[in-house]
Amino acid sequence: MISRFAKAFIAIVVALLLLSTISFLHPNSRAYLDPFSGELLGEDGMEKSLRKGQPPPPLAGVEGGVIMSKLGNATAKAALGRATWKLIHTMTLRYPENPTQDERDALSSYFHLLSRLYPCGECAHEFQQLLQKYPPQTSSRRSASLWLCSVHNHVNERLGKEIFDCAHLDDEYDCGCGDEPIGTSALPVNEAVEMMRGGR
């Protein structure tokens, strides 16, 4: 019969062997999984040797049912609808003319996530059905904005509202934003920081 001390000693030795084996087989201890891309990253960027030839995993949470319940307040529902249409129309009108695959995936994922998380559950359900019937078009600014206008008109038709002329999207949803790329601000950095702090 083995004593308690011998059992504890053997357990500690086995645990140390297991930990040392894991440390040799496990990737860099500073590696982490990027929640947006699903890529394994480390101190020197993506660990390519760990994911050779494998396609990136799909974005978690994009597919699934509606999460929110019915929104009973008609006034809140109408205000939320107007604000959301303003947001997403402005987004598609500012979307790149020649988007990268990452930008295309981001816009498509956004619409699918919106269809799950929209605070009006019955509206989200309808939006999911529209996304199934008319998948997001993300190849260019024009295709994205016209696709969204068409989807918006399907909703307007169901609600008995006026059909919007998609040729006038820029007039209706002009945000007053410039087309200046991020990082080319006319203000020097120190002045921009001062403005954020409440100065000027």
Image: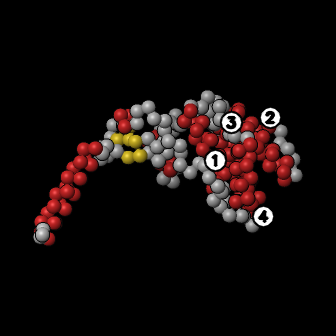
Tell us which disc is closer to us: 3 or 4: 3
Q: Earlier in the sequence, mark 1 or mark 4?
A: 4
Left or right of 36: which side holds 166?
right
Q: Earlier in the sequence, mark 3 or mark 1?
A: 1
Residue receiving disc 4 = 74
Measured from the top left, where is residue 131 in percent x and y?
Answer: 70, 45
Left or right of 66: which side holds 46?
left
In contact (CB < 8 Å): disc 4 and disc 2: no
Q: Is residue 110 visible?
A: yes
Q: Residues within 10 Å of mark 3 (few under 14, many from 20)?
A: some
Front position in the image: 171 or 131: 131
Front position in the image: 27 or 166: 27
Residue receiving disc 1 = 112
At horizontal 16% and vertical 57% (from top left) the residue drawn is 13
- Numbered disc 3: secondary structure: loop
Distance in Å between CA atoms under marks 3 and 4: 30 Å
Residue receiving disc 3 = 137
Q: Amino acid at mark 1?
A: His
Q: Amino acid at mark 3?
A: Gln
Measured from the top left, where is residue 74 in percent x and y?
Answer: 78, 64
Q: Earlier in the sequence, mark 3 or mark 4?
A: 4
Q: Residues within 10 Å of mark 4 (few under 14, many from 20)?
A: few
- Numbered disc 1: secondary structure: helix
Tell us which disc is closer to us: 4 or 2: 4
Q: Earlier in the sequence, mark 3 or mark 2?
A: 3
Residue receiving disc 2 = 167
- Numbered disc 4: secondary structure: helix
Q: Residues within 10 Å of mark 1 (few under 14, many from 20)?
A: many
Q: Is residue 186 visible?
A: no
